[in-house]
Image (cartoon, rainbow, N blue to C red):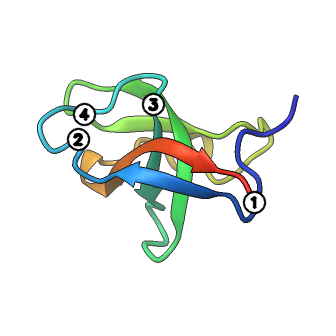
Amino acid sequence: MFPILKPGDEVLVDTKAYHHCAPEIGDMVVAEHPHRQELKIIKWVAFVDEKGDCFLVGENKEESTDSRSFGLVNRKRIIGKVKSKFPT
């Protein structure tokens, strides 16, 4: 199985997608890393709690840059929903 995004790919992000609603399971989102705000991550939403906080996972099961290592991500750290990708 090949990754959906590869280094250098560009994405189109809807930054207003979650202004009035919470992310949904299965959405691909761009978020601020919870411990390193300068780092932006692109992950899948696997779970959304009643407050709108999200459990984010990557495609790589060995990955340490998703909610398996840092827990739920506050909804305010979700930058937007990935709408399209443009391979390089």
Residue at x-position 52% and y-position 43%: 84
Specify which label sits upstream in the sequence, 2 or 4.
2
Q: Is residue 81 left or right of residue 62?
A: left
Q: Which numbered dot is residue 49?
A: none
Cβ–Cβ below 8 Å for labels 4 and 3?
Answer: no
Residue at x-position 30% and y-position 26%: 49
Q: Residues within 10 Å of mark 4 (few under 14, many from 20)?
A: some
Distance between the Cα atoms at labels 3 and 1?
A: 22 Å
Q: Amino acid at mark 1?
A: Thr
Of badges 3 and 1, nearer the viewer stands: 1
Of badges 2 and 4, nearer the viewer stands: 2
- The residue indicated by pointer 3 is 27
Distance between the Cα atoms at labels 2 and 4?
A: 10 Å
Q: Which numbered dot is residue 88?
A: 1
Cβ–Cβ below 8 Å for labels 3 and 1?
Answer: no
Residue at x-position 41% and y-position 41%: 72
User: Callout 4: helix, strand or loop?
Assistant: loop
User: Callout 2: helix, strand or loop?
Assistant: loop
Specify which label sits upstream in the sequence, 4 or 3.
3
Q: Choose between 17 and 50: the one closer to the eye.
A: 17
Specify which label sits upstream in the sequence, 2 or 3.
2
Distance between the Cα atoms at labels 2 and 3?
A: 11 Å
Q: Position of residue 32 (x, y in %)?
A: 42, 62
Specify which label sits upstream in the sequence, 4 or 1.
4
Distance between the Cα atoms at labels 4 and 1?
A: 33 Å
Cβ–Cβ below 8 Å for labels 1 and 2?
Answer: no
Residue at x-position 70% and y-position 47%: 5
User: Callout 1: helix, strand or loop?
Assistant: loop
Q: Amino acid at mark 2?
A: Tyr
